[in-house]
């Protein structure tokens, strides 16, 4: 397809950017409450666990709105990509959704349980950890590529199950735990915040190790990614991304050392976004790597314009509501406090 000849060549680009924003918002916003669940077993007492859960109670279910927007946007704007990606990654998608359901049920039942609270604690941790892991597996399965023949998925049901995808899964678990820990530093006090600050330093190192391994693995295993990053002049244009990542990681460590409460959280968000930009650089414009681009998988221009009109009106409302909720429930959640 010669995209230069189409007057609507820009529509798939707009929709790919909207999907990228939805996924980034989900990763950041749902990431910290999934991370809080991953850290649940390391709390010193049930009162600390109550404080941890209360810190995300007003936000956690709204954070998953972005997951729906991402999946729905893929279906309506890029139906061909949806029809290929979903069969290729069906099992990890199902495992992730079941884990999210389990986590949500555990969140609600734990507050009213007495004799079985410890079981709901296990369920909450398990759901959070497995949802995070399979989100990483989805990322790894997507980056490593999907086998396509005649515009249809031509691989097997376990093509995604590779060491690279498992590594990405573990990396996302560490990353969510990191953003969860700096969220607790910002939103809690006392023993919970002190413990979270100590966890954040260890997790920051772990995340950098995972990012380093993935950054080395991808160009070695996938020549198309090596060509994108390590040929001139791309090498000079893209070098600031890993350099900024290292500088920001150092800044987060210093902020944690100096006792800052808000800066580490926003610094870790910056690390996530830099890693996300790196992935985008590696795969764009392919929506089904390594064969189909955003233009080749896009819906008809009329369909994209119709959905874009609705999105233009609804997206500011969603963003405004989220901003209002976070402003309304600003400040720290102290031990014994909660939202009812």
Image (tube, rainbow, N blue to C red):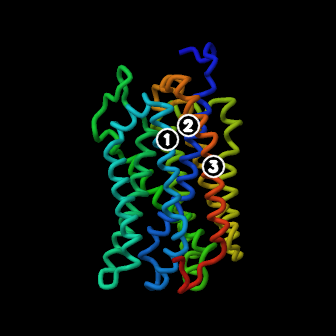
Q: Do labels 2 and 3 touch, CB within 8 Å?
A: no
Query: In terms of secondary structure, where does tag 1 sit?
Result: helix
Label number found at residue 274: 3
Label number found at residue 218: 1
Residue plotted at (70% across, 56% down): 247
Q: Nearer the viewer, residue 309 or 206?
A: 309
Q: CA distance from mark 1 to mark 2?
A: 9 Å
Q: Do labels 1 and 2 touch, CB within 8 Å?
A: yes
Q: Position of residue 297 (x, y in %)?
A: 48, 26
Label number found at residue 282: 2
Question: Does residue 272 appear to the left or right of 100 in the view shown?
Answer: right
Q: Position of residue 321 (x, y in %)?
A: 62, 57
Work out whether 71 lies above or below 166.
above
Work out whether 183 lies above or below 212.
below
Query: In terms of secondary structure, where does tag 3 sit?
Result: helix
Q: Nearer the viewer, residue 249 or 114?
A: 114
Q: Nearer the viewer, mark 1 or mark 3?
A: 3
How many neighbours does mark 1 have within 10 angstroms: few (below 14), some (14-19), or many (20 or more)? Answer: some
Query: In terms of secondary structure, where does tag 2 sit?
Result: helix
Q: Nearer the viewer, residue 294 or 228?
A: 294
């Amino acid at each position: 397809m010669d995209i230069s000849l189409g007057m609507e060549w820009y529509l798939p680009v707009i929709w790919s950017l909207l999907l990228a924003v939805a996924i980034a918002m989900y990763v950041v916003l749902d990431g910290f409450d999934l991370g809080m669940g991953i850290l649940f077993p390391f709390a010193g007492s049930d009162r600390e666990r109550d404080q941890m859960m209360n810190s995300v109670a007003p936000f956690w279910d709204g954070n998953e709105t972005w997951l729906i927007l991402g999946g729905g946007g893929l279906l309506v704007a890029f139906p061909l990509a949806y029809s290929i990606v979903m069969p290729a990654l069906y099992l990890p998608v199902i495992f992730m959704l079941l884990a999210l359901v389990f986590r949500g049920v555990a969140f609600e039942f734990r507050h009213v349980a007495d004799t079985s609270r410890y079981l709901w604690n296990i369920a909450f941790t398990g759901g959070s950890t497995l949802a995070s892991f399979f989100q990483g597996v989805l990322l790894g399965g997507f980056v490593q590529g999907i086998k396509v023949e005649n515009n249809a998925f031509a691989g097997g049901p376990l093509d995604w199950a590779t060491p690279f995808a498992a590594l990405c899964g573990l990396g996302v678990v560490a990353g969510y735990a990191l953003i969860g820990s700096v969220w607790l530093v910002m939103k809690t006090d006392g023993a919970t915040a002190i413990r979270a600050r100590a966890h954040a330093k260890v997790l920051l190192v772990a995340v950098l190790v995972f990012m380093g391994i993935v950054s080395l693995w991808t160009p070695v295993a996938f020549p198309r990614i090596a060509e994108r990053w390590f040929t001139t002049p791309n090498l000079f244009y893209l070098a600031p991304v890993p350099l900024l990542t290292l500088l920001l990681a150092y800044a987060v460590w210093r902020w944690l050392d100096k006792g800052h409460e808000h800066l580490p959280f926003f610094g870790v968000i910056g690390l996530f976004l830099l890693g996300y930009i790196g992935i985008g650089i590696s795969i764009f414009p392919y929506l089904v790597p390594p064969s189909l681009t955003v233009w080749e998988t896009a819906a008809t221009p009329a369909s994209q314009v119709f959905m874009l009109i609705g999105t233009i009106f609804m997206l500011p409302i969603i963003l405004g509501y989220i901003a209002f909720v976070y402003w309304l429930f600003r400040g720290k959640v102290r031990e014994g406090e909660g939202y009812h």
